[in-house]
Image: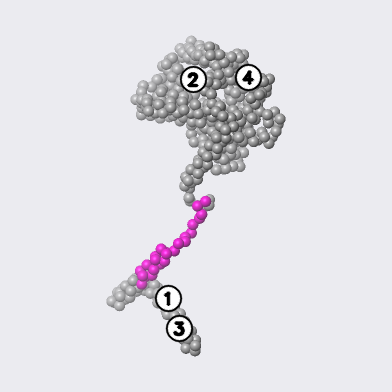
Amino acid sequence: MTDKDEFGPITRNRRRATITSAKSETVKLRNGATAAATDLTSGPKARESLTKTLQLNEDSKQKCDRYDKMSCHKLQESMLSSASSFRNYRGVLNWCVVMLVLSNARLFLENLLRYGILVDPIQVVSLFLKDPYSWPAACLVIVSNVFIFVALYTERKLAMGSISEKVGLLIYIFNLTVILCFPMVVVLKLPSITPVGGAFTLGVYTILFLKLYSYKDVNRWCRVRTQVKARSLSRSLSCPSSPSASSCMQSHVSYPGNLSLRDMYYFVFAPTLCYELNFPRSESIRMGFLLRRLFEMLLLTQLLVGLTQQWMVPIIRSSMKPLQEMDYSRMTERLLRLAVPNHLIWLIFFYCFFHSSMNFVAELLRFGDREFYRDWWNSETITYFWQNWNIPVHKWCLRHFYKPLLRRGAGKLLSQSAVFFASAFFHEYLVSVPLRMFRLWAFMGMMAQLPLAWFVAKFLRGNYGNAAVWLSLIIGQPIAVLMYVHDYYVTHCQDDPTITEAL
């Protein structure tokens, strides 16, 4: 016991002394490296000491490297932390898609078990025609050619100087006013036109109104340029762009050579609302691309009809009684039930119309500008959404409405409000007239975008702003749908016993 007690402390002291001497030797070697380097000329002993110093430094570096390799910790953030640089959430996106498919599959099976198969393609025909031998909506569309001829004839007379600019302006005002009023009066007075047929007809006349307005403006700009002795107008004055290689190969038309029937009808059928003398053209028609777009149009149209009949109609029918009784809890439940199918149908309609249909027409006409939409799904503000989800309308508003107001001294806020007001008018025009009732739900919904846009831009940023945009789309549309369907039922169908029993 005494031997162990005596030698124990001594051994510890020796170990401590050895470690201390080794550390001091290392420090001496490291600090003396510089001194040895300066004394290279002093002799071979200095060189030998420098070599030993460098060797010891290399050995210590290797030991540190081995220690670093053995280490399993480093300074880093958690992946889900906002400070982390990790951005690959593809697996989370796939999980969301799988959950969405599973939840909607459950709703689809529940719908089939409760209502059975409600899809009836023949019923779709009855939405357009009450009498198979009477096609009033189609006749209205054919009559629209009269307004096209009036606009072309007026431009030719203006180009020849047969009529003055004031007379031409009066003719255009009358022509454009009749374009909006004539189909509205016919739809309201003619009971044989169905709501769907009336909406289709009014949509055609609204597009024609916007096209002829642009046709008037561009040709007037050409006359102004001619008066100041400009040689030609290769592109539009308000939206200049460098011509592509394919368009450079084509012969450019200058005013008044564009005032032909062929040029006029090309613009009428082209997927744009803004007129130009020389549109960008593609070199050829790609048959594979054309057939794919045609297949998408046919498939998605059938899908839209099936989802509407099978999914939306039963929910809307079940919502009439809570709306009449003003049962707010059940109304909210029906609204949330309607939000999912309504939003899904809206997304399918967007792809079918703005991608499949417009690309099909553009490919058929070799129309080169295919920017019909931008990345509206990334919108962080309401304003960005309205500027990017419908590019043809946005270009028309910017070119023929917003910028002219700014040039005339109107402020930016006033000009934006005027654009929203015009958009609200046309939304109400396309909904209320075919339904033959005026409730202003679409008008108020569009005007409500102004304070909503201000709130989102001021208080919500980034992902929160994007979520607010999606929420306004998912919830806002079914509210308007329920309001119009309820009012239509009260106005036109409440006294029908067959419809009341079906509800």
- Any part of residue 355 in sight: yes
470, above or below 92, in the image: above
User: Marks 4/1: CA distance?
Assistant: 97 Å
Of pointers 4 and 2, the one earlier in the residue sequence: 2
Q: Is residue 498 magenta?
A: no
Q: Give x and y (percent) for residue 413.
A: 60, 32
Say whether residue 424 is left or right of residue 238: right
Residue bearing mark 2: 215
Mark 1 and mark 3 residues within 8 Å of each other at the beta carbon: no
Between 230 and 313, the one nearer to me in the picture: 313
Give the residue at the far right of this rendering: 325
- Find the distance from the CA under tag 3 to the CA under tag 2: 104 Å
Residue type at mark 1 is: Lys
Q: Residues within 10 Å of mark 4 (few under 14, many from 20)?
A: some
N-terminal of the pair, mark 3 or mark 2, is 3
Q: Nearer the viewer, residue 469 or 154?
A: 469
The range drawn in magenta is: 56-80
Residue 11 - label: 3
Q: Secondary structure at mark 4?
A: loop
Residues at circles 4 and 2 in contact by the CB criterion of under 8 Å? no
Instruction: Name the mark nearer the viewer: 1 or 3.
Output: 3
Q: What residue is rendered at 47% in x and 19% in y?
A: 268
Q: Position of residue 197 (x, y in %)?
A: 55, 19
C-alpha distance separating marks 3 and 4:
106 Å
Lower position in the chain sequence, tag 4 or tag 1: 1
Query: Does dot 1 land on a helix, a strand or a loop?
Result: helix
Residue 23 has which mark? 1
